[in-house]
Amino acid sequence: MESELLYQLALTLIPNIGPVQAKILLQHCNAEEIFHAKKSYLEKIEGIGPIRAAAIAGFRDFSLAEEEIKFIEKYKINPLFLTNPAYPKRLLNCYDSPTLLYYKGAADLNVSKTIAIIGTRSHTEYAKQVTEKLVKDLAAQNITVVSGLAFGVDAIAHKASLKNELPTIGVLAHGLDQIYPAAHAGLAKEMIKNNGGLLTEFRSKTSPDKHNFPSRNRIVAGMSDATIVIETGIKGGSMITAELANGYNKDVFAVPGKITDTKSTGCNYLIKNNKAMLLTDAQEIIDVMGWEDKKSRKQGMQRQKELFIELTVDEKVIVNILNEKEAVHIDEINIKSGLSSSTVAAAILNLELQNVMLSLPGKLYRLA
């Protein structure tokens, strides 16, 4: 196992091999085989080429990977490679999902309901009240709250989650050997202690440099069912995260603010340009995400029995998932079905053509 982890860690250290290229390579061989493959073989892989193949063949700095394994073992860090069953499956649907994640905590990263709550560091009292009320009103849904452990809205969301006994995960822009900002070290410990966790793609001794934050933001957006922007200016990390979430076909919500309030210009912009749904209360999230069952599973199963259409194996899998509740998000279908996204898309199209299922706003589906 340690030998396997050594090569997995080393894969993240090769110059010019980022998450996208790592995914390409892993379609052809496992981590260890990548380092033993001939340069002539690697350079023929589409998306790799001679320069990247040379970087792989010439890699010798395994000592850094060995050093990281010692850190992982000492502090009981859980390394999550792309193929690890505990890896956040929602992230796997993102083209640039991290090759390896470092995780400290007890929260399940693949629970059925996960939301990201983000916003400005210099928040108003209005943002604080909205965030706290939103988390409180969503508590009955047993959601997991994801944010960036930053000052402002992030910290409020984490603290509100703890108050309402919800698991909350902080995604970091640095290694797990430190907490940034340092003032949130106590908050981080409370999150871990109360069935939450800390997650990062950066190895130890990685400082919270400015260019790391957009990378952090893509994890926040990618591992969540929906991203909620509470308050933000027209520029900044929250706007980047919202754009990333849209790029991943995730639902984005934004809380509107006064047109004269510069701290709300970002939220108003997202709503105005149809990049986010206007959000005023928790019930709107519950409705859009289809989290409130209106009919029992028994009733749903009866509907399936009444279908006199011959379905394929893949279509039956999706119908069974739709039987579980009134409406199901596309990400949940992808995760629960275990099918590729292209197979799911094809099966959904056939089911829609046969009037077996219907498409709803917010990338939701239900039986017809």
Image: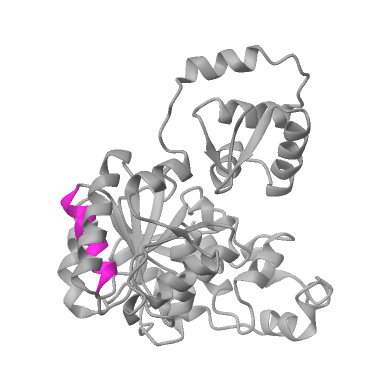
Magenta segment's dominant SS is helix
Residue 205 spot, x, y in % from top left: 35, 82
Residue 274 showing in the rendered view: yes
Q: Is residue 316 above or below residue 203?
A: above
Of residues 112 and 97, the one nearer the viewer is 112
Q: Is residue 341 above or below residue 27?
A: above
Question: Is 100 part of what is drawn in magenta?
Answer: no
Residue 177 spot, x, y in % from top left: 29, 75
In percent of the image, x 73 and y 43: which residue is there? 343
Question: Is 163 part of what is drawn in magenta?
Answer: yes
Span colored in magenta: 152-164
Of residues 266 and 70, the one nearer the viewer is 266
In percent of the image, x 65 and y 34: which residue is there? 358
| Left or right: 363 as drawn, with respect to 260 | right
| Left or right: 309 as drawn, with respect to 21 | right
Q: Is residue 101 above or below residue 297?
A: below
In percent of the image, x 53 and y 37: which residue is there? 328
| Rendering quarter of residue 319 | top right
Residue 36 spot, x, y in % from top left: 70, 70
Q: What color scheme is it?
A: one colour
Residue 289 spot, x, y in % from top left: 47, 44
| Left or right: 77 as drawn, with respect to 129 | right
